[in-house]
Image (tube, rainbow, N blue to C red):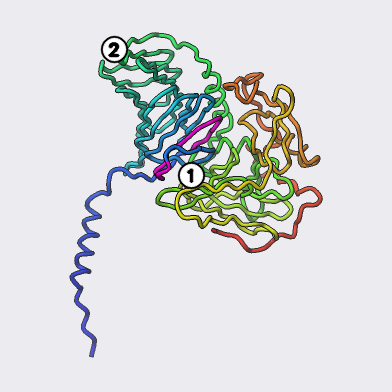
Amino acid sequence: MSRPKPRPSIKLLLAAVCISLLSVFPARADSKARVVRLSEVQGKVEIVRDAGQGYEKAFLNLPVTQGVKIRTADDGRAELEFEDNSTLRLTPDSEIEVPQLSLRDSGAKVSSIHLLAGMAYVTYQGAKEDEFTVTFARESVTLAHAAHLRIALGDADAAVAVFSGEAQISSPAGTATVAKNQTVRFDLVKDSYKLAKNVAEDPYDAWDKQQNQYQQRYTDSSYSSYSPYAYGTADLNYYGSWYSLPGYGQMWQPYFTGFGWDPFMNGAWTWFPGFGYGWVSAYPWGWVPYNYGSWVYMGLYGWMWQPGGAWMGGYPIPVYVNAPLGFVPPRTPMFPGPRTVTVNRGSGSTLTGHVFNRLEIPSNSAGLGIPRGSIRNMGQVSGLAEQRGSATTRLHIDSPGAPGRWHGGGFGAPQGSSWGTRGLSAPRPMSSGHSSSGHSSGGGRR
């Protein structure tokens, strides 16, 4: 005799109804899941996160989410890098807040920045359906297409200068379309504006220009083959080389990774509200390789980064494979509550000379302390440091405190890079004294 079929319970029926409703009604229009990168920090820069700590010290590669505030002191500069390689740069004595970083159901990105004080440069490269807005006082700048502009806010006046593209500006005095090589100036007291067909030069234009040149030169159109997003990929191309290894595919390795270096020697564990502790790398290239893929120890060749897997959203727990004997794994701090725990086991580069325009780079520094684009023959200098233990080279900037005054104009492609000829070269084995016996299976997500 067959057993009777059980009748569905009231709870199961309710669950089925809920599932049906979810399939009919769309999810909420916006998600707060977006994370952008604090990609440049010079001098004193501070940040407010939702951690109840007020303003705290900001540092390179901190994830920036909706609701944060960032300010620079009189010696500070900062840069935000968005997923599509759009950037917002802050000059000294400036402050912003980020009211919105969201993602629509359609996949369109919605970004809103509010300039509270000072001056910001915006380079926008978003897709057609994306929305990018910068507000200041009671004015609003909307960008619908690629554009490059400068926004300066004073106590009683403001100005928007457009270098390329165009910007739509709304204000109490009306709306205006500002085209390439035009400037609109606002009287914030009288609620009026004037449009001028020229752009006056500012001392920080050179710094902004050089940063844009760096991004354009080192961002490759094939980034989608090794990262879901464009941001951070220019740093991979400048600070290291790509190799094709049998059985592993495309692998990347930073320059200046001598004996004893591992990917977790320099950085910090920092508390993220709602997530707990996450790893933030101190290296100038340390965004993509710590949010995506895994670090693999390759015997004679040392540590290399392998793309793949899922993007970890800016709150990463380090992933590593095949760690060598003696490797000290990164361990999540057990301290309760918000704080930052610094890890500093490796040395960085050191400025030398009377005019501070020469840099001494240890073989295991992995680029720590090397400014973007400041060395034109990075691969050659790295090879010299591997042979001698360190190398000294001239920086192509006037001084570490100057606003981007570069000698010679432009940047040279890094020598020794296999970018563009991937598959034709292989990493050199470590110099004598490097261990090749490290093949422990310990590793993975910690």
Identify the amino acid type marked 2. Answer: Ser
**How far from the left and from the top, in percent, is residue 166?**
38, 20
Q: Which residue is mark 2?
A: 192
Q: Which residue is mark 1?
A: 228
Task: Identify which residue is drawn at 39% across, 43% down.
Answer: 50
User: Is residue 103 positioned above or below 170 on the image?
Assistant: below
**How far from the left and from the top, in percent, is residue 240?**
65, 40
Q: Secondary structure at mark 1?
A: loop
In terms of image quadrants, where is residue 82? top left
User: Is residue 111 positioned above or below 205 on the image?
Assistant: below
Residue 79 can be seen, yes or no: yes
> As drawn, is 142 to the left or to the right of 26?
right
Residue range (magenta): 37-53
User: Is residue 350 positioned above or below 26 on the image?
Assistant: above
Identify the amino acid type marked 1. Answer: Pro
Pick whichever, 2 or 335, lies toward us. Answer: 335
Task: Identify which residue is drawn at 39% across, 16% down.
Answer: 159
Q: Is residue 243 magenta?
A: no
**How far from the left and from the top, in percent, is residue 10?**
18, 70
Quarter occupied by the N terminus: bottom left
Q: Residues within 10 Å of mark 1 (few under 14, many from 20)?
A: some
The numbered mark at residue 60 is none
